[in-house]
Structures are given as C-alpha cells and as structure tokens.
Image: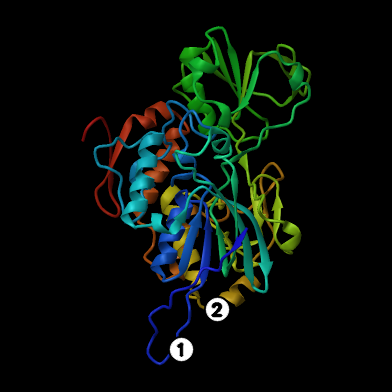
Amino acid sequence: SKFSNIEAENMAPEKGKVDVAPKKVLIVGAGPCGLLSLRHCLDMGLNAVCVDKRHCVGGIWGIEPGETGAMYDGMRTILPKEIMAAPGLDYRPDLPSFIGRADVNEYFQDYAKEFNLEPKIRFQTQLVSIEPLKGSFLVTTTTKRIFDSEESKEEKKTADMFDEKTVELFDVVVICTGNASTPNPPSFIGQDSFRGKVMHSVQYKNAKKQFSKDDTVVIIGAKASAWSIAHLLSPAVKEVVVVKRKNGEFWPQTDVPENVHSRTYDFAGFYEDGLITSTGEKVPCSGVVYCTGYKIDLPFLDLNQFPGLCVDGPAYVGPLYNELVSIANPNLMFVGFSRHCLGMNAFDIQARYVAHVIADKIPDLDRKMAEAEQKPYIDSRGRPSISNPKSVTLEDFSNSLLAEIKHAPLRPVIMGIYQEVLAKRECSLPQIRSLNYRIIDDITFKSYVGDA
C-alpha cells in the first residue's frame, strides 16, 4: 500500500492576513450530489477531490439498463427537465420535459465538462474506511488496476478487483452516495417455497424478458416506481396488482390499463402459488416486484469510531444540523439524504450550503448547532427519518439554507412547476408525462401537449 497526503495549494492571501492552506475535502460519489458539491467546494477555493467506484460520473443515472442498479428499459423521469437542471447549465432545449436515463446521464457528463470537474475525480476508486484522527480523517481507498493489452489473460481476470490501496488524510468528508443503492425489501416467511419470480425493483429491467403473457405480477408499493413499472408490465403480462400496505403511502391513479388493479393488503408470507395476507387470505400470483425503496448504507463508516452518529432504519442518519452536517462530527457532512428533495435544485442548494460551512462562511455556526434539535422525526410507520416534510415545507427549508449563506431565494417558478406536477402525477403518470413545460420568467411557466 502507499500513503499520500494531498498537498494543498495556497489560496491567494487577503491583505494583512497570514496565508492559510485551503481545507482538504473528500467528496464521496460522483453522482448528482457529488458533482454539485465538488463544483461549489472548488468555487470556494477549497482543495477538494472526489472518488467514485464506477468509471464515469452520474451515479445511478450512469448505470446502463443491463447493469445492476435502479435503471430499467423504458424508464422516464417523474419530474420535468425544466426543474431538474442545476443552476448554471440547462438541459438541451430539443428534449421533451420528461426524459429517459440516457438523457439525464448525458446532462451529468456535460455538467462535469462545463465546470471542468473530471480532473478532480478519481474514478474506479472504492472507499474502504473513514477513521477520525485528531480532528481530521484517515481515509483508505482501493483503486482498480489498469492492465495493458500485452498482459496475460490470467492477469486480466483480476482487472475488476480493487487492489491498489491508498491511505490519505483529509480535513472534511462529504458523503454524497445517496440512499438509492441498497434495496430495502420486506422480509416475508416462505419465500423459498414460492414457485414464481421475486425481485426488488432494482432487479427489474425488461417486462418481456423477465415475465410472460400468462403471468400475474404483484407489485408491493404504490408510489412512483410501482406505477411506472406497472404501466410497463401491463402489455407484457396477464394482470398487474399494485398493492398498498394498510399504513403505507398511496398514489391513486385514474388512467391505468384494464389489466392493472390496485389493492390494500398486509402480507405475512408466501405459499407455493402466491402471497398470504395477515388475515390468511391467499393472493395467487406468479411474480412479485418489491417497489419498497432503499435504505441508507454506509459500510465505510464504523459507527463505533463516530460517537454521536447514528444510522437507524432505512431513512435516518444523524443527528444532522440542517439535515446536512453531523452535529457530533461537524467535519462529516451528508448531501442528498434529506427528504426535502426537489432534484438538482435542492441538491444544488445543499451543496452550496455545505461548501459555505466548510469554508467557515456561516456566522455563529457553533451556537446554532449546539441549539439544534437532535431527535429524529418519526414517520407514520414509526421509523426515524432525517426530515419532517409536514412541519417544514420544501420551499421554506430550501430558502432557509439560502438565506443563511446570503443567497437569493429559490425561484417561485420552480416550486410552481413542482406543485403542479406533484398534483397531476398522483392521478395519472401517463397524463403528466405527455406534457411539456416552458419557463417564461421567474414566476410564470407554460404547460402544453406536444410542441410549443
């Protein structure tokens, strides 16, 4: 293994002040949040680098449909591109408002080029561990070996192994891995006895390749991914049943194919030919797709070394100040984990805020963190969560962060489009995806079917 300590370049000194080397910042993940965090940290003059285990930027959006990850054939966004773009770079104007994976991934490639981020990204680099060390962090990574064309086949078999170890010291670590990589399926008894197919939505790729015309598929979960997959499954199978748990959230849909139905069940387990409810009712099926979301997974953090930091359930890491900064470990930050989410706009605000925190640009931050609420919000299912979206609106949360860094508030037109899309997509995903949007000014927008 090798030990290296990134040498910081001196910032231009202010008049009358002693030179201070910029903080060394590690950003984990080159997905949307990682790219935004890297851009804003560099803009603040910080010595930031980013690591990502894949070979390209984009996170889950960079995953091809055949790869393991939350992408599938026919996938389209549930927000229009007009509010998915980060400040500083718009999507191509010739694209429709609701776009596919390849279009989103192209945008992230363009974003990295526009702000010259790739020289600061170490691709194919796996984060192994983060250890606190006298106010800093000792970070261990492993990197995939790069083989030349003349090496033997036996040597190339190890080409996918992360085996070049590096240990470095950083002042700050910003976790941008998100919470959409590790599936969170329910645990039902008897699954081994079931004769059909069982998969999480992360494993779903193509309706015709994975199911047949004779299949009845039960989808457990009733929000965006569930209804999106239900519409794609409909022409390829006999019947689709979208199931909401009794205390779960539900998007009522009015515009659904004839062979797609919604039901409310609490399942207890499987039998050979289907599922069994908690009341003993049998629900026959030949396939089950869990659209039950993901859970926070931070295998590189040994929580025993981070007293005061807790990961609890699928949606909680904390306590965090402003849902971003670890109160117990203020040099450890999390971007993109908050449920106050509006895609790239919200992520951009969070990244800007974190960059200001790292650069010591937030007045009286120590006092604010000491006075912050440290108890997690408990959701309707009794699970701890970082965010309480019912007590603080997305708009208020975003604008409070912007006010603290003395930045202009979120443009009203962004929230206007978001609220309209949210209302319409909970009734009909096909209807909302047939629309296009055009921003007129900071307040006004136009929605229409077809070309403008």
How many marks on residues?
A: 2
* 296 and 339: which is toward the camera: 296
* 348 and 418: which is toward the camera: 348
Q: Is residue 237 left or right of residue 375?
A: left
* 395 and 238: which is toward the camera: 238
Q: Residue furthest bottom?
A: 16
Q: Amino acid at mark 1?
A: Val
**Residue at disc 2, secondary structure:** loop
Q: Residue furthest top?
A: 214
Residue 241 is situated, as x and y percent measured from the top left of the image, at 58, 19
The answer to whether any part of residue 347 appears in the image is no
First in residue order: circle 2 vs circle 1: 1
Tell me the tag on residue 364.
Answer: 2
The answer to whether any part of residue 310 appears in the image is yes
Residue 95 is situated, as x and y percent measured from the top left of the image, at 28, 36
Q: Is residue 258 left or right of residue 320?
A: left
Which is more foreground, mark 2 or mark 1? 1
Give the residue drawn at x 42%, y 26%.
74
Give the residue drawn at x 51%, y 47%.
124
Residue 201 is situated, as x and y percent measured from the top left of the image, at 57, 29
Q: Residues within 10 Å of mark 1 (few under 14, many from 20)?
A: few
Where the C terminus falls, by quadrant?
top left
The vertical placement of 108 against 222, above or below, is below
**Residue at disc 1, secondary structure:** loop
Residue 175 is situated, as x and y percent measured from the top left of the image, at 56, 56
> Label 2 to label 1, Cα distance in Å?
23 Å
Give the residue drawn at x 44%, y 65%.
41
Q: Amino acid at mark 2?
A: Asp
Give the residue drawn at x 27%, y 34%.
448
Q: Which residue is mark 1?
A: 18
